[in-house]
Image: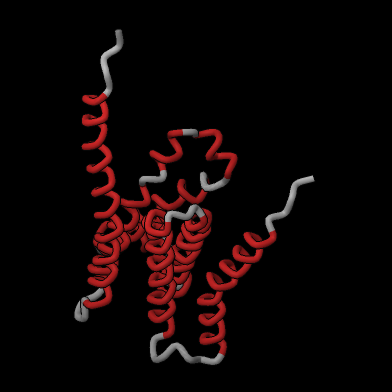
Amino acid sequence: MRKIDWPWLGLKTCAHALALLPLLLLIRATLIDALGADPVAELTHRTGDWALRFLLLSLAMTPLRRALDRPWPIRFRRLLGLYAFFYASLHLCVYLVLDLSGYWAQILQDIVKRPFITVGFLAWLLLIPLAVTSTKGWIRRLGRRWGQLHRLVYAVGVLAVLHFFWLVKADLREPLAYAAILGLLLGLRLYWRLRRNAVKPRASANTPAAP
């Protein structure tokens, strides 16, 4: 019989509850008519915000693991990534169902004519294979290719921030903050890769030649 990891189960349950809290608050705000003068725009904005926040949180788990020298942050990375896809899908659904009011064919025109929709839709499309292959079964099947595939998340982050930049017309402070966080998270990964590549030649040079 498989032993249940109760502490991890409790933490995971809390993580799910916290991740679903923004959705519950949105539902409550909708029911009590507290979304302001343009509720559709507010729903679109909030779901997009939470998609980007969860995406950045998932990217932050690897630096957090290295900073703490503990493995537990990695156990939350997949969960946070799936919630990023969940809120991104809600973001798209609000746009399709409420903003376009059922005229879904118009999205093809918007994708072609409006760059911020083009990059946002592309970011969502790239999230689909990441969400589908997030299970342990797919990790086993793909092996090393799984890690290569999931590097698409870096492109998703760039496209999502660009989507926000092009959407906002006046106050750029919020998208700039997200861009700074993404730049830091990707910059750390680039630094680690460069340092690892620099160490390899030195290690090879110090290895004695085979007799």
Q: Position of residue 1 (x, y in %)?
A: 80, 45
Residue 118 seen anywhere in this rendered image of the structure: no
Q: Count the numbered circles shown.
A: 0
Q: Position of residue 146 (x, y in %)?
A: 45, 39
Residue at the image point whose x is 21% and y is 37% from the top: 198
Q: Residue furthest right?
A: 1
Residue at the image point whose x is 40% and y is 56% from the top: 124
In-front residue for pair 134/92 = 134
Left or right side of 12 for 114: left
Quarter-of-image position of residue 197 = top left
Q: Position of residue 29 (x, y in %)?
A: 51, 87
Residue at the image point whose x is 48% and y is 91% from the top: 34
Residue 188 seen anywhere in this rendered image of the structure: yes
Residue 160, compared with residue 71, is above or below; it is: below
Q: Residue furthest top?
A: 211
Quarter-of-image position of residue 57 = bottom left
Residue 81, compared with residue 30, is above or below; it is: above
Q: How is the image coloured?
A: secondary structure
Q: Position of residue 188 (x, y in %)?
A: 27, 54
In-front residue for pair 89/203 = 203
In-front residue for pair 205/196 = 205
State the quadrant of the C terminus: top left
Residue at the image point whose x is 33% and y is 60% from the top: 120
